[in-house]
Amino acid sequence: MSKQVHSNSLFLHLSILCGILLTLIPWPPAVALFQPHWAALMIAYWSLNAANSRVMYVAFVYGLILDVLMGSLLGKHGMSLVALSFLVTKSAKKLRMTSFWQLLMMVLVWLFNDIVIRAAIDWLSYRYQPQLSDLLPLITAALIWPWLKYLMDRLQTSIRNS
């Protein structure tokens, strides 16, 4: 059993690191405009599927790592990812029994909340004026979430069965 817990924990960390790497890839400007917050998608997935609130601690640590790597205000991503993880964890039991479309809408609401928190921190720290284009990653997240959830569920099942 401890081997299964260890492999599941390793998968959690590797998937979030992959999300951070996808965030750091230099995309062309037209693509970067639509780039979803990959780390937030991974944190939302793990907060939804984890049986405990340990993901909040993981979200904070990886948020700080993301802040350091992106050169943003220290704690900006950490705070937004912890808030995301808290909201998802709080309603995870109910959402596991909802339909696909309801879950997708809730994921979009959580990601919108993540964008609002980061925009508020940027506004407070250096008077950044939010733009309507800041919401474009939600469109991409809506397209990616079903495939990401399916892939992660399949990988998690294969790890559990091996």
Image: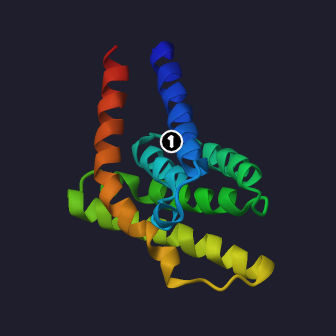
Lateral position of residue 98 relative to residue 95, left or right: left
The location of residue 69, given as percent across then percent down, is 73, 49
Placement of 77 over or under 9, stated as above or below: below
| Quarter of the image where the N terminus is located | top left
Q: Residue at x 52, y 44 (%)?
A: 19
Lateral position of residue 139 relative to residue 30, left or right: left
Lateral position of residue 21 relative to residue 128, left or right: left
The location of residue 111, given as percent across then percent down, is 47, 65
Q: Residue at x 41, y 68 (%)?
A: 138
- Residue type, numbered disc 1: Asn
Nearer to me, 94 or 57: 57
Local SS, label 1 = loop
Lateral position of residue 97 relative to residue 26, left or right: left
| Quarter of the image where the C terminus is located | top left
Q: Which residue is mark 1?
A: 52
Placement of 139 over or under 126, stated as above or below: above
